[in-house]
């Protein structure tokens, strides 16, 4: 993990491999952002003009490297775009700062130390820059750089930027220190979740995921309970067992419980943890299987959130439920037309074995409701329909309480995560009527993401506030990295859930 330090030193006096400064997009050309005064002075006050001559606009994510002039102790100046300049005497929003820091950190991979001289007027700015830099410096290298890897002359993959120093900050200021500590804890847990999502499914089985959760729980003072296939059968968890019965790697249900002596409320989180999703007997078509190791992103988000809550010492009880299974086709797999008896006692006719996430979530939701938390949020890469509706960067929010849905949407915006409130139309329930069982696991094709939400609502106890986050779009990024978002697992929804826990 990239190290983070705060420093009162100026950008010109700090020894580093590079100095990062910001530039905004102004009406008359690039505008050098606060924090870069010493660097601008080293350019004889003409940094803005130099950048304009080079065609730099200050657009968000734009990265430009310049040789440092005399007067600076770093050999390189990295200029990163912040987007539109704020109004006169205005302040920079935290998300552009977060993204800029992430883009800069990515561009400096392979370097040992960088001084970030971006605008840090408030503790919120400190947190945003620190968080963005630590998230942007992420790289998943566990399976690269082996002794015999690469061709002759290949030195292997570049390591992430080793150290980030935020200049112009106040290391002894309680607010600045707290902001940095929160950014470190949050970024480390997001990156831990990214590692899990990126881990190949032959190594991250349900049992292996449960072992990771158990070890992390012990390290952070969190109680962990793991139900194996025998305990699941004894408890009647027909949904989780039904999804996992086709695999040689049996399913697990993991309960993590963080408690605080001053907590007055309890938040329960439920995560879909399909460690690999082939679609089962309803096999996915060619081209849709390659990234299905990411189908446990919801469980990874829940796991990381509980650990983050413990590390931050939040005065709230947070319980996480990881519904872990591998959905595989075999002679023992659930068939289309089979009926499963769920943990709730209700029966579900499985018409499509690739609609498996809602089955494991239904069992975990029912179990979570038994503890009567103040609210439950489930998180899942649940439907391709949600990707069609909202694209690859936005997750959908459904809830049985409009105010709770709005709260989560607003918290996501503050966290820097794109989300959108979605409805739960009651008329979609009829499409899941089954002549054989209490309900079918699929309904109308149109509005499939909403249908899945309506199905899950059936397994939430009356009187319990509940929300469903469908993170199928943003959980796994297949394109080129941008901002602080890497290629592969992103850690989607974790920062939103931590803010929700803090609000409790």
Image (tube, rainbow, N blue to C red):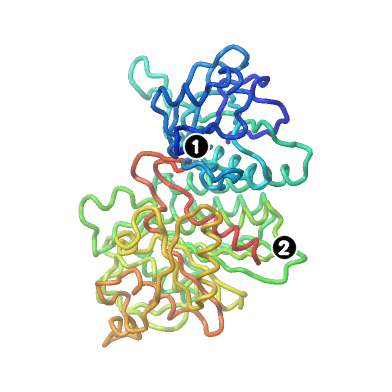
Residue identified by numbered label 1: 24
In the rendering, which numbered label is found on residue 495?
none
Residue identified by numbered label 2: 315
Q: Of the residues under marks 2 and 1, which one precedes in the sequence?
A: 1
- Image position of 416 with respect to 484: above or below: below
Q: Judging from the image, what secondary structure is the residue with disc 1 in?
A: strand
* Residue at 32% in and 68% down: 355
The percent position of residue 190, horizontal first and vertical second, equals 54, 48
Where, quadrant-wise, is the C terminus in this rendering?
Answer: bottom right
Give neighbour class at mark 1: few <14, some 14-19, many 20+ (Cα, 10 Å).
Answer: many
Q: Give the number of marks.
A: 2
The percent position of residue 313, horizontal first and vertical second, equals 71, 56
Give neighbour class at mark 2: few <14, some 14-19, many 20+ (Cα, 10 Å).
Answer: many
The percent position of residue 34, horizontal first and vertical second, equals 61, 34
Q: Is residue 403 left or right of residue 348?
A: right
Q: Is residue 322 left or right of residue 217?
A: left
- The CA span between labels 2 and 1 is 39 Å
* Residue at 47% in and 21% down: 50
Q: Nearer the viewer, mark 2 or mark 1?
A: 1
The reply to whether dot 2 and dot 1 touch (C-beta < 8 Å) is no
Q: Judging from the image, what secondary structure is the residue with disc 2 in?
A: loop
Q: Is residue 466 left or right of residue 354?
A: right
Picture quadrant of residue 245: bottom left
* Residue at 40% in and 39% down: 481
């Amino acid at each position: 993990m990239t190290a983070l330090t705060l420093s009162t030193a100026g950008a010109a006096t700090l020894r580093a491999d590079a100095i990062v400064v910001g530039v905004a997009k102004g009406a008359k050309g690039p505008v050098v952002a606060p924090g870069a005064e010493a660097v601008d002075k080293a350019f004889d006050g003409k940094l803005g003009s130099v950048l304009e001559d080079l065609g730099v606009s200050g657009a968000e994510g734009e990265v430009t490297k310049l040789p440092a002039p005399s007067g600076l102790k770093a050999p390189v100046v990295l200029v990163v775009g912040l987007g539109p300049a704020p109004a006169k005497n205005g302040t920079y929003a935290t998300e552009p700062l977060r993204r800029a820091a992430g883009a800069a950190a990515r561009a400096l991979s392979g370097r040992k130390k960088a001084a970030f001289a971006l605008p840090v007027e408030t503790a919120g700015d400190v947190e945003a820059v620190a968080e963005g830099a630590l998230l942007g410096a992420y790289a998943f290298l566990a399976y690269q750089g082996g002794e015999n890897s690469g061709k002759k002359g290949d030195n292997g993959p570049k390591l992430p930027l080793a150290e980030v120093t935020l200049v112009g900050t106040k290391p002894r200021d309680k607010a600045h220190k707290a902001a940095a500590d929160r950014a470190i804890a949050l970024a480390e847990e997001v990156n831990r979740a990214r590692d899990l999502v990126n881990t190949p499914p032959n190594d991250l089985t349900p049992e292996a995921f449960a072992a990771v959760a158990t070890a992390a729980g012990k390290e952070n003072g969190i109680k962990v309970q793991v139900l194996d296939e025998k305990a699941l059968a004894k408890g009647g968890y027909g949904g989780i067992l039904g999804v996992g019965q086709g695999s040689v790697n049996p399913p697990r249900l993991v309960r993590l419980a963080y408690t605080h002596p001053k907590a007055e409320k309890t938040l329960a989180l439920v995560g879909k943890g399909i460690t690999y999703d082939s679609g089962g007997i309803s096999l996915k078509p060619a081209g849709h299987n390659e990234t299905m190791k990411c189908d446990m992103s919801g469980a990874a988000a829940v796991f990381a959130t509980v650990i983050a809550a413990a590390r931050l010492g939040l005065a709230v009880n947070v319980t996480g439920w990881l519904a872990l299974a591998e959905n595989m086709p075999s002679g023992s797999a659930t068939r289309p037309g089979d009926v499963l008896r769920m943990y709730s006692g209700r029966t579900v006719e499985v018409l499509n074995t690739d609609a498996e996430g809602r089955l494991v979530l239904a069992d975990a939701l029912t179990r979570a409701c038994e503890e009567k938390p103040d609210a439950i949020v489930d998180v899942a890469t649940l439907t391709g329909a949600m990707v069609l509706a909202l694209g690859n960067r936005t997750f959908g929010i459904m809830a049985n309480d409009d105010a709770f849905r709005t709260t989560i949407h607003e918290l996501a915006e503050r966290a820097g995560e794109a989300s959108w409130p979605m409805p739960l139309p009651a008329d979609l329930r009829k499409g899941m009527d089954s002549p054989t069982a209490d309900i079918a696991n699929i309904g109308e094709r149109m509005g499939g993401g909403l249908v899945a939400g309506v199905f899950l609502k059936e397994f939430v106890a009356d009187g319990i506030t509940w929300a469903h986050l469908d993170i199928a779009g943003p959980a796994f990024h297949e394109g080129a990295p941008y901002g602080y978002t890497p290629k592969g697992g992103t850690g989607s929804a974790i920062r939103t859930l931590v803010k929700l826990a803090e609000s409790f």
